[in-house]
Image (cartoon, rainbow, N blue to C red):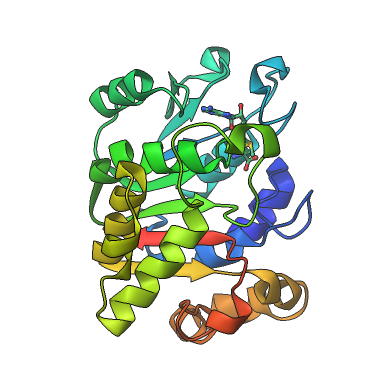
């Protein structure tokens, strides 16, 4: 089954039907289809929508939609779910739960110790820039060479908690500058950024094997009409044709939604 169909089946908004319908599964299907039957190690930070991102502990923990999607898509997966809420009850078999607050360095250091090297790391946590940048600092080195580190929903930051931490720029702003510098050969970020978080985020994006910012809006509308059968037939052609980097589409990407780094 295609990832987008699994997103609908299990109820995550990474697909094109539910909630915000981000359309990320279209991109993921293109990136990960070749790994489907491999022994993939995938870690996802953020397991269930609910409550507000500034008060996640008020959530009633009942399900792990995206985890169930990954567990079905990759039958040989080792899945590691990370969350501030307690999902221990759902941790069994190929699903290992690690509890951590993405805003607390000691929690992330513990995750670094407990997590094996992963092929794919997805940050779908609070979406606050401080959390994204602190997590990137600790967890990017846990991604195997050639593996993917992904941050979802760069276009949106939750209001009250976006102000926490010593953040100069939001993650999308830093990533845009880093990708632009990669192509122009300049080092504007090194001159502009003062704070450790900005610098390490900038360097991760600048030095990644591949760094891509996606705005999935057009993929979303395309998915409803033509993409799944077409992708099924010609995944590589589709990848080249539909996935674009920020430089080529920079005018359309004022609000990029997804950052993909290949280590
Ligand atoms: C958008 S939901 C995840 C949705 C899920 N990945 C899916 O596709 O259905 C965000 C998750 O991040 C968790 N979260 C919020 N703040 C967090 C923090 N500071 N540290 C770790 N997890 C956090 C919430 O408890 C919630 O489970």
In this picture, residue 14 sits left or right of residue 248 = right
Q: Nearer the viewer, residue 247 or 122?
A: 247
Determine which quarter of the picture holds residue 222: bottom right
Q: Quadrant of the N terminus?
A: bottom right
- Ligand 1's image quarter is top right
The residue sitting at 30% across, 43% down in the picture is: 196
In this picture, residue 219 sits left or right of residue 81 = right
The residue sitting at 75% across, 26% down in the picture is: 51
Above or below — where is 41 with respect to 26?
A: above
Q: Nearer the viewer, residue 17 or 193?
A: 193
Above or below — where is 224 with respect to 15?
A: below
Q: x, y percentage for residue 42? A: 39, 42
Determine which quarter of the picture holds residue 263: bottom left
Q: x, y percentage for residue 153? A: 60, 52
The residue sitting at 48% across, 86% down in the picture is: 248
Q: Is residue 42 visible?
A: no
């Amino acid at each position: 089954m295609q990832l987008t169909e699994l997103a609908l089946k299990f109820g995550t908004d990474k697909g094109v039907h539910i909630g915000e319908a981000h359309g990320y599964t279209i991109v993921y299907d293109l990136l990960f289809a070749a790994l489907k039957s491999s022994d993939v190690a995938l870690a996802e930070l953020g397991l269930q929508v609910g409550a507000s991102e500034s008060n996640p502990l008020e959530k009633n923990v009942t399900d792990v939609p995206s985890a169930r999607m990954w567990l079905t898509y990759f039958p040989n997966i080792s899945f590691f779910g990370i969350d501030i809420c307690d999902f221990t009850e759902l941790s069994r078999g190929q699903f290992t739960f690690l509890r951590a607050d993405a805003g607390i360095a000691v929690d992330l250091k513990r995750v670094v110790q407990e997590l094996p090297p992963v092929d794919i790391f997805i940050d779908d946590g609070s979406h606050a820039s401080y959390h994204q940048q602190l997590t990137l600092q600790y967890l990017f080195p846990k991604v195997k060479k050639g593996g993917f580190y992904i941050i979802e929903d760069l276009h949106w930051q939750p209001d009250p908690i976006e102000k926490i931490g010593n953040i100069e720029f939001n993650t999308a702003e830093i990533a845009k500058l880093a990708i632009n510098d990669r192509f122009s050969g300049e080092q504007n970020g090194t001159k502009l950024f003062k704070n450790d978080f900005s610098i390490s985020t900038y360097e991760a994006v600048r030095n990644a094997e591949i760094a891509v910012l996606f705005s999935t809006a057009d993929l979303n509308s395309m998915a409803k009409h033509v993409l799944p059968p077409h992708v099924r037939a010609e995944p590589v052609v589709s990848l080249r044709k539909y996935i674009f980097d920020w430089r080529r589409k920079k005018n359309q990407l004022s609000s990029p939604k997804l950052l993909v780094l290949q280590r």
